[in-house]
Image (cartoon, grey):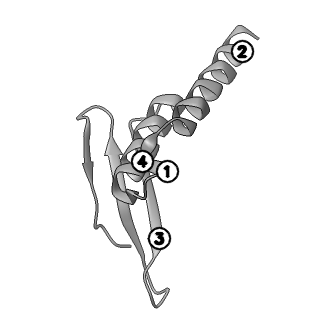
């Protein structure tokens, strides 16, 4: 029960942090994706978080932002 409460608290904190992030309101999509992946990785307690989009012809997906928590670094461009 206590773990669940802590998890929910962390989620609420993350939502508030995202709501206050200037990147989402000033059109800086690259910075917004960095903020989103960093907060997601931290909140979900995972080592990596990423955002993927379909390529124009929908024949692959491309990583537009990958955050690696252990290295505290971002990358992009991988395709599957």
Q: Quadrant of the N terminus?
A: top right
Q: Nearer the viewer, residue 26 or 29?
A: 26
Taking the spot 46% from the left edge, 35% from the top edge, the residue there is 39
Asked if the residues shown at circle 4 and circle 2 are in contact, with their CB atoms under 8 angstroms apart, the answer is no
Residue on which the image places disc 3: 53
Q: Nearer the viewer, residue 42 or 15?
A: 15
Q: Earlier in the sequence, mark 4 or mark 2?
A: 2
Q: Earlier in the sequence, mark 3 or mark 1?
A: 1
Asked if the residues shown at circle 4 and circle 1 are in contact, with their CB atoms under 8 angstroms apart, the answer is yes
Taking the spot 59% from the left edge, 30% from the top edge, the residue there is 16
**What x and y, as percent, mark residue 29?**
40, 59
**What x and y, as percent, mark residue 21?**
47, 39
Residue on which the image places disc 1: 25
In-image side of 80 versus 53 (left or right): left
Asked if the residues shown at circle 4 and circle 3 are in contact, with their CB atoms under 8 angstroms apart, the answer is no
- Callout 1 crowding tier (Cα within 10 Å): few <14, some 14–19, many ≥20: few
Q: CA distance from mark 4 to mark 1?
A: 6 Å
Q: Secondary structure at mark 3?
A: strand
**What x and y, as percent, mark residue 30?**
34, 57
- Callout 2 crowding tier (Cα within 10 Å): few <14, some 14–19, many ≥20: few
Q: Secondary structure at mark 2?
A: helix
Above or below residue 57? Residue 45 is: above
Of tags 2 and 1, which is closer to the observer?
1
Q: Earlier in the sequence, mark 2 or mark 1?
A: 2
Q: CA distance from mark 4 to mark 3?
A: 20 Å
In-image side of 44 versus 66 (left or right): right
**What x and y, as percent, mark residue 72?**
26, 35
Above or below residue 6? Residue 21 is: below
Q: CA distance from mark 3 to mark 1?
A: 21 Å
Rendering quarter of residue 69: top left
């Amino acid at each position: 029960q206590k773990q669940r409460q802590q998890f929910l608290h962390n989620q609420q904190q993350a939502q508030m942090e995202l709501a206050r992030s200037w990147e989402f309101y000033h059109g800086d999509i690259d910075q917004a994706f960095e903020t989103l992946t960093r907060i997601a990785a931290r909140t979900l307690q995972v080592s990596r978080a990423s955002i993927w989009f379909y390529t124009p012809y929908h024949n692959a997906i491309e990583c537009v932002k990958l955050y690696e928590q252990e290295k505290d670094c971002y990358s992009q461009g991988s395709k599957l």
